[in-house]
Image (cartoon, coloured by chain):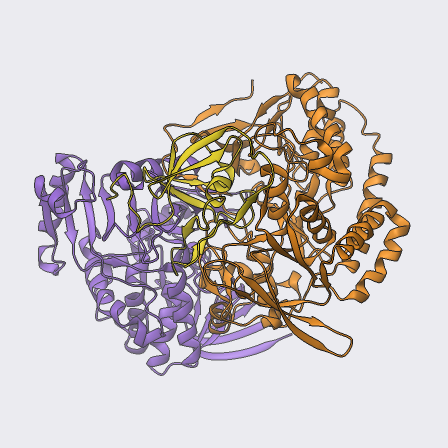
Chain colours: A yellow, B orange, C purple
Amino acid sequence: MSMNPLLRRRYRLDETLVPFTLNGTAQTGRRGDTVLTAILSVSGRLRQSEFTGENRAGFCLIGACQDCYVMTAQGSRVRACSTALLADMAFITDLGAVSETAHD
Amino acid sequence: MTESLQPVIVGAGPAGIRAAERLVRAGLRPIVLDEGQRAGGQIYRRPLIDDGRSYRSRYGSEAGKARRLHEAFEAILPAIDYRPETLVWNVSTPERGNQLDVLLAGVHRQIGFSQLILCTGATDRVLPFPGWTTPGVYTLGASQTALKAQGCTIGDRVVFMGSGPLLYLVAWQYLKAGARVEAVLDTAPVTSKRHLLTLAIHAPRIVALGLSYGLQLQLAGVKIRYGVRPEAVLGTSQVEGLRYRRRTLTGEAVESIACDALAYGFALRPETQLADLAGCRFRFNGRDRVWLPERDALGRTSRSDVYVAGDGSGIAGADASEISGELAAAALLEDTGRALADAAGLVAARKAILRQRDILEQAFPFPDDWLETVPDETTLCRCEEITIAEGRRAIAAGSIVEINRLKALSRVGMGRCQGRMCSAAATELLSGACGTSAGEVGRLRAQAPVKPIPLGFGGSVEAEVRS
Amino acid sequence: MSRRISVDVAIIGGGLVGSSAALAMRKAGLSVALIDRGYCGAQASGVNYGGVRRQGRPPEQLPLSQRAHGIWPQLKAMIGIDAEYMRSGHLKLARTGKDFAKLEAYAETVRDYGLGLELVAGSALVRRFPWLSAQAVGASLCPDDGHANPRLVAPAFAGAAERAGAIVLEQTPVREVAATGNGFEILAGDGIEIRCQQLVNSAGAWSDRFAANFNEPVPLTRIYPSMVVTEPLPLRLPVSMGEQGGSFYGRQVARGNYVMGGGRGLPLGDPDYSRPSVTAASSVMQRAITLFPHLAGAQVIRFWSGTEAEMPDGNPVIGPSETTSGLLHAFGFCGAGFQTAPAVGEVLAELVTEGRSTTPIDAFSIGRFRKVAANTAASL
């Protein structure tokens, strides 16, 4: 199953790096990224849909379609396209992967 | 008139900013609520941080307008009560008083208003096709937002599809940004472009820009196709290509093209949920195939304390939004006895733009045969994952002729996005199944909250009472 | 456009009571017209919580409720869909010792009705229901109570009735109705004339107009639920829940949404329409977080309300008119009509075909409001 990054950076390439964790693996975003940009610059999925389990990676990017929710390692969820990336955020887009916090 | 007013403006895009500006000029201090982190709306959306790009780099031909709008906002900022990152999720009806329910930092607040100007903007309008939920498929607006606000392109090898001037603009922007534009697939027949000749009389700049983009795309070797209908996205976990049909001189051809991203859309749809919750009367607009709050030339609605402006009151573009924001504020000032509207010039300017929109729709027509070309297994409602087939079954089983009934019995439109992404298709499906027109199947009634809110509101409501 | 219809029974109101009555009467061989001013099942039948429960009802409702309990599992065979009916169990929490005493007293009162109530208290509560935060003193569980999707049931009954030969007239408001001495005459919709031998008034929150039309005014008031729905979430809540002495109720549907309610909504300028009260909805949301800490990150995606009808003593009106021969009433279910409605439909069919019901309904006679009606008339 190919999970190539979906977004290509064209600007802010030299911007301050912002560390975050994705499925337990350390990644870096850039200052000024949304969570969506950070995650999809290094991977190809934000979540799996509730009913068919298909991969989703956002759609409208302006907070209308409500498709880009991503799970944090703490168990909460954020709307990725409208949430700024902050240092040390941790996300889980692959529930089968190792996560740092156990879920109920 | 000594009553103290508390006008509230929802939306800090072109319409909201110009409305606020006009009110400030009249000595009022409006509350301006915006869901985003920085004012500017979508067309003139600003990045989260200063990324060193010039206005020309970010906004192209509209750089001047963008700069002036942003500067206008910064200029009035000290004179307004500006609340960013604030979601307005409910409006009370007149008998319940004048309250907005908002969410800020996870906390529920209520804000009272004496007048309300809704400048809620728009989203892309989309229709479903096989694979439209695949990672790598985005709306046209999304592909532009990614580049504008985040400095990213969706993918490296991108296909653009749909109908509207945005199609050529974004494709060209991607070309300039260094992406490979694999194709521009126009769903309108090439013959519809003859209307651009008429448009050139009314809006020569728009046409000149559009032709320029088209020409540059062609010179860059980008495949441009007309009369396109998609057949399927290729690739399951991610976009790997697109198969589509197109009109040729002799009939139809089926082609496939490899790509790693697809951006598509058919113009925009207005965000009208708050006007609905406010109790405004709606009327069906045949050209845009959408229900709009009834409005007069200035933006007054059927509710005397509610005004509408911008694309949320009918899609007309950023220029018209700026004008209509000012008009709505002028109406408010006139209605509260503060100033005569003296708006004839602005009204005329807006009317001229609306005439252009009529021609634009003819040059870039909505593909009203869409659902006949899409297989029934296609997902119709992406939130609830309801297929077109399930929708058809529900319509037949329940003899459904009305869209809220369709929602109740099939779940289409019951998901998180409240029908934003599926209502256009649901309308076409239902009207097609009933043999009626798009305006005869009703409209999806808004329900609070207009966007999802956290179950843990965060304690008791903080009400702001007008003093 | 005029149309003349002649049937054995006309039913005013296509909610779950009316539409299940239409099906039952068709099965009994009667010709039936089912009339609704909107779409069948779009009012109280479609906007209620969806609880299919016997526990908590006053004893006089239990025979009817037990009869309905036997009908619900047969929905698929009767109307073609199971409407997501499941016997999840109904768990009624007691927040205080006094509330638990009330649950115990109720269990004792209804001991002979076969509800199978189990009282659970203290540490046993947390052990059996680990997803529940330990905020309750105890609870009463009715293992075979459950829930279903209210939007689907009444429309499916109406559809089944139509397939069975009933005439179903939607978007057809009743303009006039009168007794003729030999049945009734109804003028409805766009010039539709209906003649019938017997008439059922199952018009929900609008039944009082029809009762008054036949000189039997009733003290019906409208109530509006305040419902809150979450996005779909991982399945965690296996039972439908309520609270003794509190107003919270909640369930999780098979698709994962939590459907919760409590308190009252508010009518709009037009009392046929309503909104949830934000205060009530906020209370529901806060109670949900307190009861189900695992919902901390959940989101609400929709509020809804609707129009239900309440009678002052908490019981519905079911049974023959006291003024007009051939008229039957069935309304005023106080927001608790969903579970009993299929049995009420059968009872109405019995009343028409045999003149009596095999299930006791005397407690629901419209005559109990006669004194009130007389006082009202005297005071005018």
- In which quadrant of the rendered image does the C terminus of chain C lie? top left
Residue B108 lies in quadrant: top left
Q: Image point 39% across, 61% down: which residue?
A: A52
Residue at the extreme bottom: C29
Residue C303 is situated, as x and y percent measured from the top left of the image, at 43, 45
Residue occupying image coordinates x 56% and y 78%: C4
User: Between residues C336 and A17, which one lies in front from this camera angle?
Assistant: A17
When asked about the image quadrant of residue B350, the answer is: top right
Q: Please provide percent x and percent y for residue B57.
A: 71, 36
| Residue C374 visible in the picture | yes
Position of C244 relative to B340 (above/below): below
- Where is residue C54 drawn, in percent x and y? 21, 57
Q: Viewer-proximal residue, B375 or B179?
A: B179
Q: How many marks?
A: 0
Give the vertical position of C329 relative to B347 (above or below).
Answer: below
* Apparent side of residue B165 relative to residue A45 in the rendered image (left or right): right
Q: Splitting the image into 4 quarters, where does residue B117 fall?
A: top right
Residue at far right of view: B201
Identify the residue at image location x=12%, y=61%: C114
